[in-house]
């Protein structure tokens, strides 16, 4: 596979009305596949002859990317069908690994300075000269989930590559959360699926209608979405600082720590910026 960098020169933007109308359809991802060079790096992360990687326009986690295969024979296939082609599946899985590593580095860039698990590594790198062998630091790739929806919301084949936190203002209702927090979300590494895999029939299983349950601690919230959202913010804070260990003096209460995370979140998430390749 021959890769080429995204061109810095960009075409004239489309007229807003046409652009908005297209994005309201289930075929919206087709624009990125056909003309990735017309988008800025804050939208298209990278592209090559076989794939386009983009920021999800409506992210459901603090970092949410999509990988779009450019094989025209697979555009409109359901992922369950597309991934029956083992050669194609392996190509997708290899590209997902690359994008996952890139996403992990982006998480480290955004939150590494707040993480206690990164402290020893940061301090070692600040030494002059730094040691020959650095402490391992935090495994950010473990905090990236990759997969597809059993019933995709968009027509073009796409694979989600996203942080596990489910922390986003675009996460607005039950289906948003459950589509990423139940077996409705099928990890890419689970393919190929067995013919009798129950995830092939998401409607029968009722995944999207399940009561809320925290993806991290398994706490149950019934149908109380706002309580779940508040809890997800707390889990995001704990995840950022590493599991309830917050490096603040004892006289400073938890809300100060929360505000620190919120400031970082506003700076790093609410405006999508280019990911350094």
Image (tube, grey):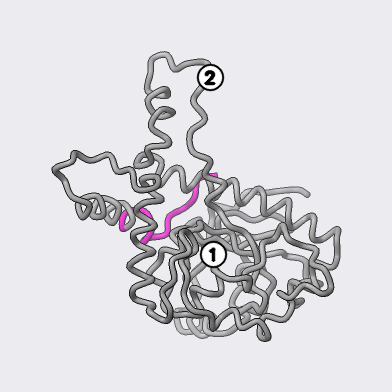
Q: In the image, what residue occupies the spot 49% across and 76% down? A: 176
Q: Earlier in the sequence, mark 1 or mark 2?
A: 1
Residue 262 in the image: x percent, y percent? 28, 56
Q: Is 176 colored magenta in this rendering?
A: no
Q: Nearer the viewer, mark 1 or mark 2?
A: 2
* Magenta stretch in the rendered image: 266-277
**Tag 1: Cα neighbours inside 10 Å, few (<14), some, or many (≥20)?**
few
Q: Determine which residue is flagged by label 1.
A: 11
**Rendered image: mark on residue 88:** none
Asked if residue 47 lies left or right of residue 86, the reply is left
In what element is the residue under mark 1?
loop
Q: Decide whether residue 270 is among the magenta residues.
A: yes
| The furthest residue to the left | 251
What predominant SS class does the magenta segment belong to?
A: loop
Above/below status of 133 relative to 159: above
Q: Looking at the image, which residue is at 55% across and 44% down? A: 277
Is 180 located above or below residue 175 in the figure?
above
Vertical order, 268 against 58 (above or below): above
Query: How many numbered markers are drawn?
Result: 2
Left of 200 or right of it: where is 122? left
List x then y, in percent, for residue 11.
54, 64
Which disc is residue 133 wearing? 2
Q: At x 41% / y 77%, what residue is drawn?
A: 172
Viewed as shown, does residue 107 lie left or right of 29? left
Task: Provide residue 272's location: percent of width, then percent of height.
Answer: 42, 59
């Amino acid at each position: 596979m021959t890769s080429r960098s995204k061109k810095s020169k960009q075409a004239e933007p489309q007229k807003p009305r046409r652009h908005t109308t297209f994005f309201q359809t289930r075929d919206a991802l087709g624009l990125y596949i056909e003309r990735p060079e017309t988008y800025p790096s804050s939208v298209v992360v990278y592209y090559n002859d076989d794939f386009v990687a983009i920021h999800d326009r409506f992210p459901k986690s603090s970092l949410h990317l999509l990988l779009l295969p450019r094989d025209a024979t697979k555009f409109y296939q359901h992922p369950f069908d597309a991934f029956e082609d083992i050669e194609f599946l392996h190509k997708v899985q290899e590209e997902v690994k690359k994008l996952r590593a890139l996403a992990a580095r982006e998480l480290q860039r955004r939150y590494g300075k707040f993480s206690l698990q990164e402290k020893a590594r940061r301090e070692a790198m600040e030494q002059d000269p730094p040691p020959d062998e650095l402490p391992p630091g935090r495994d950010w790739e473990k905090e990236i989930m990759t997969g597809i929806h059993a019933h995709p919301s968009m027509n073009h084949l796409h694979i989600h590559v996203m942080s596990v936190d489910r922390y986003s203002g675009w996460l607005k209702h039950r289906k948003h959360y459950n589509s990423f927090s139940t077996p409705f979300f099928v990890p890419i590494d689970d393919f190929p699926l067995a013919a009798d895999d129950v995830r092939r029939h998401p409607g029968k299983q009722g995944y999207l209608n399940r009561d809320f349950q925290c993806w991290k601690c398994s706490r149950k919230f019934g149908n109380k979405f706002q309580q779940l959202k508040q809890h997800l913010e707390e889990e995001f804070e704990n995840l950022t600082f590493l599991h309830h260990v917050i490096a603040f003096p004892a006289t400073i209460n938890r809300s100060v720590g929360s505000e620190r995370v919120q400031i970082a979140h506003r700076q790093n998430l609410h405006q999508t910026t280019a990911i350094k390749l």
